[in-house]
Image: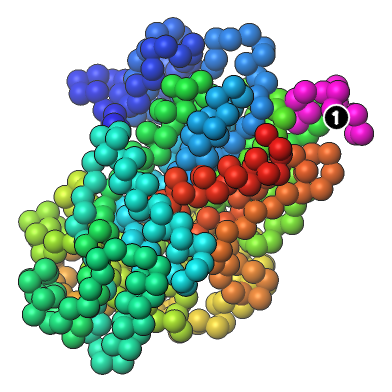
Amino acid sequence: MCNRALKGSRWVGYTFPPSLPYKVQLSREGLRGREIINEPFKVTSTDRRGAHLFSTEDDKSKEYDIVIVGGGIVGMATARELILRHPGLKFAVVEKEHKLAAHQSGHNSGVIHAGIYYKPGSLKAKLCVEGLKLMYEYCDKNNIPYKKCGKLIVATEKDEIPRLDALFERGQENGVRDLRVIGPHEIRDIEPNCVGLKAVHSPHTGIIDYGCVTESYGKFFQEHGGSVFTNWAVRKFSLTPEGRSGDLEGNKFPITVIGDESKNQMLRCRYVVTCAGLQSDRIAELSGCSREPRVVPFRGDYLLLKPEKSNMVNGNIYPVPNPALPFLGVHFTPRVDGSVWLGPTAVLAFKREGYHLLDFNLADTFDALKYRGTRKIAMKHLGFGMSEMWRAFFMSAQVRQLQRFVPTLKRADVIRGPAGVRAQALSNDGSLVDDFVFDVGEGDVGKRVLHVRNSPSPAATSSIAIANMVVDKIDKTFHL
């Protein structure tokens, strides 16, 4: 289960297992000294940026068989699968933020997808259908709350009906269970406030908190001997000093992963696997790989139904995808906490990890705009992009889009909600990279680093299935 808070205490957050040999060093603003606590406790949620994990073991604790870079859902699922398959090896995860699932894994709509949209026979289709089954099984076994609230994909215009029918056929080919096509009356039976000419109903689509899932993977990993280091941003990969080119076999841990050298953040290892999400291209470049495909961040801004209006929908209501547009469009998504998210928009983010409308980082913006692929996609979809920017600033414009499905929705029913940033991999010609990309560099360092460059949606749903595939790739590449 996900431990969010310890009521009545200043120090709240995640409980580390008592059996693990950890000291924890805490610091917070306003305190001149630092308190060292050598017992199980809960990390502060008010000043978690100051929390660090330190192993109490000797210097050998810095030596690992594999270091995984990235504490998102794919990174932690991969770490979990590695320790399941290879219990005799030592593994560590390094995460640059103060907690796991700090970015895409903790800033998403929380939908457990069924696998309807994806091309039959594709890896995405296979992994999603398999991933849904594995996700529900994992959650049942580990008491993680979810709800099978279902999904309606609704055609509101006649020209959408052929695309909807094709979507139904695609879902059947992919092996999605219990799909059916329904008409206007059955739409109303499932969603009394929704209107449409025709819909595909997916009863096994669900909702979940993927932040909790990621934390659960992390808990399992730690309980089985894995180490997790937060506030640990990778700055460099290098040869371990005693290792020499051409003589690496004599050094058991030839790679050094370097973070903040002023804090002595250095781990030695045999191999590295990166699952770095929004930073995946930059991390790949550190090991000598090309930055392409580049990550270009797109922010999605959601609206929230006011609490008194949250009964307006029962499940997910989605549009029929338009193949001429790069992104799906607005939808209604209930959450496990009882709230309902509406949206999102899809606009170029001017900060890779910026979750507010006006967040801006000069380096990130320049990096995105100087890339030829960004300029190509911007020119191709200029009208779409401008309309998305308009909807991001003016809630009434977004509400009008949503009223296609729920006409009774009013501007007064919604407030601004959260946002997420999608790590969209783009090729140099401006096309979206819609498949998994693995990359291994060259040279003494690069050949020992495997990068998971792109884990496209629905990566959270498919995380266990993806981890199985990634670890198969690790086993094959590194001969574990």
List x then y, in percent, for residue 389: 40, 73
**Residue at position x 57%, y 77% from top?**
377
Q: Quadrant of the N terminus?
A: top left
**Residue at position x 21%, y 50% from top?**
147
> What predominant SS class does the magenta segment belong to?
loop
Residue 114 among magenta residues? no
Q: Which residues are magenta?
A: 242-256
Label 1, secondary structure: give it. Answer: helix
Pointer 1 residue:
248
Q: Quadrant of residue 271?
A: top right
Q: What is the three-letter code of the residue carrying label 1?
A: Leu
Above or below residue 410? Residue 10 is above
Horizontal side of 445 relative to 115 (left or right) equals: right
List x then y, in percent, for residue 292: 69, 61
Horizontal side of 93 relative to 215 (left or right) equals: right
Decide if residue 81 is in sight here.
Answer: yes
List x then y, in percent, for residue 178: 24, 66
